[in-house]
Image: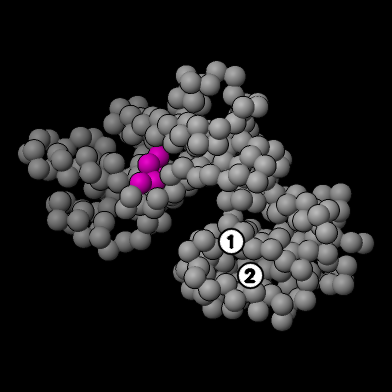
Amino acid sequence: MKYIISLDGGGTKSEAVAYDLEGNVISQGYSGFSNLLINEKDGINHIIEAIEKCLGTLSKENCLFLFIGIAGIGGVKDRSPLEKALNDAFQIPFKIVNDAQIAHAAMLNGQSGVLTIAGTGSICIGMHKEHTITAGGWGHLLGDEGSGYWICMEVFKKITQEFDEGIPLSYLSLKMLERLQLKEADGLKKYIYHNIKAEIASHVPFIVEMANLGDLMALTVLERAGQHLGKTTIHAIKKLSLREELRVAIKGSILQRIPVVQKTFIQTIHEQYPTILFYTEDVSSTFGGYLLAMKELNNY
């Protein structure tokens, strides 16, 4: 049986899935992160390991193509070590793209439109035929509005404002400091500047819990996150200049798992595009790799 393997590689894990030529899953393999910007050697090893696990008992000779989507690949100056490792390990034709490209293909089933991703960071990617654009995705220092990191930093900034103004701390601020076991603003500064983005963003579920309990500050921050993501998506739609049916898909924990963010996001876009179609059902990004791999094979 002929098949292809699609790999979705992010900052925490790598998922390789083998699909037969009709798009049915026949095997899977997992490993650690693939983002080479974190650690090139480990990232390459994880990619190879995930594919090897996916191959399992399958005949390597029947694999027609490897389609690999990797987070951060656009920032990698030299891909040759990865390309050499893939050639040495498998001797199978392959293509390497950004993970957002396969996610787009998966969520929109290969159709034109915009995919908005909001997890720890945020980005919009729009595709129409061979034209690709992005909006957002500037990273936490320049943007990432609406992301998990942004949501938490908005709360932390509010705490610093309350300290500076000498006003009583809000209930959310008190509960957040209690969660961090902090009593003074200086402790908050140390926490922010000595922790990675993922650690700071890890407080999103707590903020959501507070919003569900009726905390107005928490609810406002989440609504603003949806508005920011909606506005960035609108920018992407305009840059793409689509004249056909408009489609927007969403991916990532912030948009998929927080109802108030998703609701505000959809409302913000509907104000300008009332007839736009939204795709909210989660689909494995590896399916996008399958679709793109089949397109590559058909062009041979």
Residue 5: percent from left, percent from top: 76, 61
Q: Is residue 58 above or below residue 238?
A: below
Please give the name of the residue rendered at 46% of the width and 42% of the height, measured from the top-left corner. 135
Please give the name of the residue rendered at 55% of the width and 36% of the height, measured from the top-left corner. 240
52 left or right of 26?
left
**Residue in front for this viewpoint, 37 or 187:** 37
Residue range of the region highlighted in magenta in the rendering:
143-147
Callout 1 amino acid = Ile
Residue 20: percent from left, percent from top: 85, 55
Q: What number of labels is visible?
A: 2
Q: Secondary structure at mark 1?
A: strand
**Residue in front for this viewpoint, 134 or 52:** 134
* Front: mark 2 or 1: 1
**Residue in front for this viewpoint, 15 or 100:** 100
Report, in whole angstroms, how far the alpha carbon at label 2 lies from the one at label 1: 9 Å
Q: Is residue 51 visible?
A: yes
Magenta stretch encompasses residue 49: no
- Point out the image quarter for the C terminus: bottom right
Callout 2 amino acid = Ile
**Residue in front for this viewpoint, 227 or 212:** 227
Q: Are the residues tagged 2 and 1 within 8 Å (C-beta)?
A: yes
Residue 262: percent from left, percent from top: 50, 31
Residue occupied by mark 1: 70
Residue 198: percent from left, percent from top: 41, 56
Residue occupied by mark 2: 47
Q: Is residue 48 above or below residue 96?
A: below
Please give the name of the residue rendered at 73% of the width and 72% of the height, measured from the top-left corner. 52
Q: Which of the colour schemes (rainbow, by chain, secondary structure, one colour) is used? A: one colour
Q: Is the magenta region chiefly helix, strand or loop?
A: loop
- Point out the image quarter for the N terminus: bottom right
Q: Is residue 211 visible?
A: no
